[in-house]
Image (tube, rainbow, N blue to C red):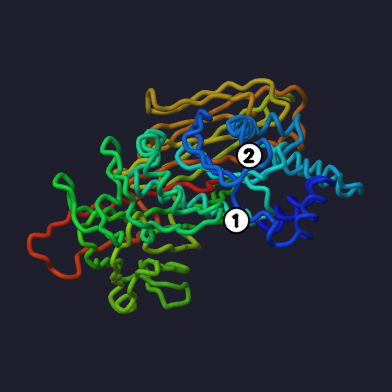
Amino acid sequence: MISITTDLLLIGTDRHASQKVGSQINQPSAQRPTTMISNFFVLSPRGDTIIAKQYRTHGDIGAHERSHTEAFFRKVKFWDDMSQSVPGGYASIETNAETPQSSQRGVESSNASLGDAPPVFIMPDGLSYLHVKRNGLIFGCSTDRNVSPSTVIEILSKIAKVFKDYCGTLSEEAIRKNFILLYELLDEMIDYGYPQVSNTGNMINPKTASANSVHKPVISSVNADGRKNSLNSNQKNEIFVDILERLNVVFSNNGYVLNSTIDGCIQMKSYLAGNPELRLALNEDLVVGKNSGATYGSVVLDDVNFNDCVNLSEFENTRTLSFVPPDGEFVVLNYRMTGEFKTPFRIFPSVEEVAPDKLEISVLVRAEMPAEHFGANVTVEIPLPKCTSSASCSLLSSISGQNTAEFVSREGKIVWTIKKFPGMTEQTMRAKVNLNQSCTSQVRREIGPINMSFEIPMYNVSNLQVRYLRIAEAMPGYTPYRWVRYVTQSNSYVCRL
């Protein structure tokens, strides 16, 4: 959907731009611009340009490249303010339409653009800018072509992944200390604005080694074919397995679950010399498909898709996967689970009108996971009506110094943070809200929905387990270290009011 919409928007930016595009189409093929990406850049959280690569010049734009990245960063950083004052988002693209219906769509787009900057938008220089955010860094590019946004965003994501594989970690420090290596990789991945190689396993062995001052990279020692052959003397034979689950849950105002899904994956990162074949065993009672005759207590997954490197010859009988791990960090399988499951947190809100212009909001959050687990960096956000003048919060908690709640007037919501939320406990927050007008049904509808974000280490909701991880063929003196980690995160954890 985004591909079609943005392609149309790029063509209809303004009358001069559309004439320019039309003239380029009518030109002979030798004279048409042949670049998909004009500029590529990586920006730090402060807006500093860490890496920049120009594939095509546009008049005098090349002489002012830094000013354009600065203008792009300001646009992304202060999208809310600029959306209200300066046309430049999706709404600005339809300002030339002459019909009242299209004008109304432009107003609706302007109202919908509040919040984070979209991944694709047009700047005053006439170029389309596309970007993704990874670990606080912005991977972006610009183009004057009517390209597919989905394709370019996927390219940027692949570049970020390759950078992480070769640097070990994706941070500003790692990029600055490996910028010669990363420029070499970038030359191999993109040629004259067109993507060439996007997978770590297909990269040619770079001449520049990774810096030793940052976290160990996945690609440490490779031969001429680009495959790992041996380890450094101070590097262990290790393999890391992460079972990641992201929860999408919708609660009613009385705490009942209305809708719930789990999007999970098994992710691996291999530091094994020689790339031996591995065997990964999952639950013996694992059932794929709801209508597959599952027994009570078994793990039922709606659907599963596997990496191309996985051999499934033994999966049907023993639930065992065999594969040779490719270079870099990769996903062994993705799975999805819907239906009823025990949610780690439950939310019980209540709203009471104590005076015509005063409300009292109470939110109780109960951790229903086992006591040996805990939720880390828990945040509960409660949007308040636009007519809110002030709000005071009080906490009923046994946790001291790790539980804070405040009203953020600029964002119009209460932010309640809990650094560590132990299992089998509950926390309560009460807020007294003062309004500038009388509380009506319309005002009450502006409260909520409550949004909760958290991360639970060493815990998964679906009960999908790794029984063992072994090397397929016994190798004398080869003793790898295996690390398995379970992580549950909130993707969309919402309670309606």
Give residue 313's position: percent from left, percent from top.
31, 79
* Secondary structure beneath label 1: helix
- Total numbered labels: 2
Residue 169 visible in the snapshot: yes
Give residue 237's position: percent from left, percent from top.
18, 53
Label 2 Cα neighbours within 10 Å, binned few <14 / some 14-19 / many ≥20: some
Q: CA distance from mark 2 to mark 1?
A: 16 Å
| Camera-side mark, 2 or 1 | 1
Query: Toward which corner of the image does residue 332 lie, by quadrant?
Result: bottom left
Give residue 350's position: percent from left, percent from top.
59, 37
* Secondary structure beneath label 2: loop
Q: Report the residue marked by disc 2.
A: 117
Q: Report the residue marked by disc 1.
A: 150
Residue 493 in the figure: left or right of residue 434: left
Dot 1 amino acid type: Ser
Query: Toward which corner of the image does residue 225 lie, by quadrant?
Result: bottom left
Near-viewer residue (335 or 126): 126
Q: Residue at x 37, y 33 (%)?
A: 173
Label 1 Cα neighbours within 10 Å, binned few <14 / some 14-19 / many ≥20: some
